[in-house]
Amino acid sequence: MPFACVYVPEFSVQALVRHSNVCDLGEKSVAVLAGTPPVVAVIAVNEKARLAGIEPGMTKVQAEACPEVVLLSRSPAQEESAHAALLDCGQAFSPQVESTRADTILVDLHGLEQLFGPVQNIARELSRRAADVGLDANVAVAANPDAAMHAAHGFPGVTVIPPGKEAERLGSLPIDVLAVSEEMFETFDRWGVRDLRGLAALPALALSERLGQEGLRLQAMAMGKTSRTLVPAQSQLHFEESMELEDAVDLLEPLAFILSRLLEQLCARLSARALSTNELRLRLTLEVNEDVQVKQHSAFSTQHSVVNGEVFPRSRGTGTEERCREIHERTIRLPVPMRDSKVFLKLLQLDLQSSPPAWPVKKISLTAESAPARATQSGLFVSASPQPEKLELTLARIRNVVQGLGKNSHREKKKLTDFNVAERVGSPVLVDTHKPDSFLMRHFTALSERSRPQVAVPHVANALRMFRPALAVKVELQNGVPARLLLDGSRAFSDVVAIAGPWRSSGEWWSEYAWSREEWDIAVRQKTDVMFWRVYRDVNRGEWFVEGSYD
Amino acid sequence: MVSRSGFAIPISRAEIVRAQVEANLAKKIPSALTVRERPKIELFSTGIGEVDAAIARETGAESGGLPRGALSEICGPASSGRTSILLSLLAQVSGQSHPEFCAVVDASDAFHPASAEKAGVELSRLLWVRCGSSSGLRAAALSALEKALKVTDLLLQSGGFGLVVVDLGDLSPQIARRVPLTSWFRFSRTVENTPTALVVLEEEPYAKTCASLVLQVKAAQARWANLFSPEFFAAAGSSNCAAPTHTNLLRGLDIHVEVARARKQPQSVVSFGRKATSAASSAFETQMPWAG
């Protein structure tokens, strides 16, 4: 029964360097620091840093003596993301995956040969999957979990140990791969036992007399003869990638670079589980810069902060903020599950352009809600429709174009929000009410099914063109009937040529949105043309409005 | 050349020369001397038989409608009935047996969803982009026009829509005329060879030669009805014999449409010269929802 072990050397470093495309950290010497000041020490280094003379255990001051080494603080959040990514790699092949340590997973490969081919192929594929999520891992396959784990810890790259050859292959590994205690390591060192071959060659009885059962267990491990049952990790479909930044980012462009890398990792993880996402949540932890100059903007009640020459509108807060950090959250809901990092990036960029964070960004966290991948099959007789990914991007761009409502938008928006119709882009849905011009805007998707059976309209229906907001008008009455109209801004009255009405209606008298009106259909002569309007009198306010024109 | 029966078929020298010239030019200009047949233009019926018939008369085709892959204009003053024609077209495209997605780019936020639903438009297949408002301010109108053009560009580039409508109906001609001809040319080039029909609703035709079809809607006449005859009120002793306004009813509009421009359907026989014919026109009635 073969087992595979995936081990990520210098896990703390790799967890931070996963997003190296952004900062080119992969090419540099990196050391990871941990601890509470003033006791801050190096806990992990990469190969380049090791060659530069940095060792784990050195203090921060000692490490700083080497100028070419990049010192980074340990990030538990990024380590958690990296471990979750590692688990996703294993669970892409088998449900039996053990989360042995943060940097190590064990995968039960029993029966997988029929699906994925020989174990060599599976080991190579595991290595490739790990590389896809930004981890440079050692992969080893052996007949038992411990042998596989020791081989992965000891041999770089991909190692496959044939059954029965465990002792022979593991023999060359140093004794410290067994994770023995310091005391026992010294004992073996005194005996001159420095590799597993030496430990395996010791007489079992004598070893038992001197080191007890622990000695025998270590010898069995050195010979690759132990056997144990895997403890499978709970399969959690939680996809989150986060990154803490050393220096806060205050421009959208560098933020987009970081988002791009995070999204690539997220999509690689989703791909490993054959899943997509229909909801993407971006959580930005913001850091207030004490030097930020806050000025009052004349046109808006909200304030604007000037950061590095760019003006970010602030949603709330006055003067200097008490809190050091704020959270800026954005959610992108997709009508269909997707897994395209470029589309996600563009959507996030457009969203952040329309609602940028108020302060420089210190930490980025991206969460994807998993959903089964979309399976579509187009037919010969199916009408063409917009591609969902392209359509989402187009809608986001359109929203960005039409977002600004103009100078008189405040009053207009207030008026429109009665029925939550402030959304400017979407598919209209009629509301079940008698109040005229009541509708909601729904997110437009290219997957909408026909909502009702198509009924042929026997005649050409007359259309009404709305004036939004309704045009205020002065009305001259004759015997209680409108005779002449004067539109706001016009100089001359218009004569009413023909008229029908009034048609009275009212509603919501039980709420603060009570309405009551008298509608008239009128023909008005304007210069030489005759226009057909729907005019109404707001009974509650006693004012007249032109609601629309029949056209 | 040999026929199936084995007899040799004589080939004229001209054909041989033509074949040789085409063979020599094949790398530079494929089929240089072959007249390429233009594919037949696909049409969307407007849903109004009279209008379709007028277009068919003008184009010389068997059936009429608004062409796919081309820019069409529906022009007319306010209250002329142009929006009724548009809603009928939208109902045809979104609600036919193979329904397609439609988009309305509304420069003055004038679209009335309830009217559209009454006309048979499938609202779930309609993307409505509200670019502006009917505030009447010149700056706001210019901003709305600019937004509408940008949105139209994005929608046409995105593709997949059967019908894209740009509603400039409430913009004054002074403002709408500011759209450069290059924009219309770009739009018409973008929709060319695509299954999308681009329709612009406006007061006057602005796209000039970029439009394949221009429907000019004339000022409409209203049909008023009264529940009672004048004699009824005379008999009732009313002093001025005028019917009370609440007994009146606006039943609909009588609409007159003229096909001001229509690109001819490709025909196998190419005729030279242009016949001087009057523009095809038609008239139809619309009906208010309450007119039964």
Image (cartoon, rainbow, N blue to C red):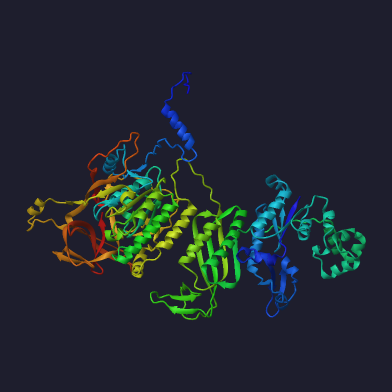
x, y percent for residue B206 = 30, 54
Instruction: Left or right? Give the position of A274 relative to A107.
Output: left
Q: Is residue B141 visible?
A: yes
A250 relative to A335, above or below:
below
Q: Is residue A509 visible?
A: no
x, y percent for residue A492 = 17, 66
A33 relative to A339, above or below:
below
Say which of A91 and A208 sits in front. Answer: A91
Q: Looking at the image, how many numbered discs can be counted on the residues?
A: 0
x, y percent for residue A481 = 16, 62
Q: Which corner quadrant of the image does residue B42 belong to?
A: top left
Instruction: Left or right? Give the position of A348 relative to A27.
Output: left
Q: Which corner quadrant of the image does residue B104 belong to?
A: bottom left
A288 relative to A485, above or below:
below
Say which of B248 and A532 sits in front. Answer: A532
Instruction: Left or right? Give the position of B23 relative to B66.
Output: right
x, y percent for residue A258 = 57, 65
A355 relative to B287, above or below:
below
Q: Which corner quadrant of the image does residue B31 belong to?
A: top left
Say which of A390 and B119 sits in front. Answer: A390
Say which of B124 and A124 sits in front. Answer: A124
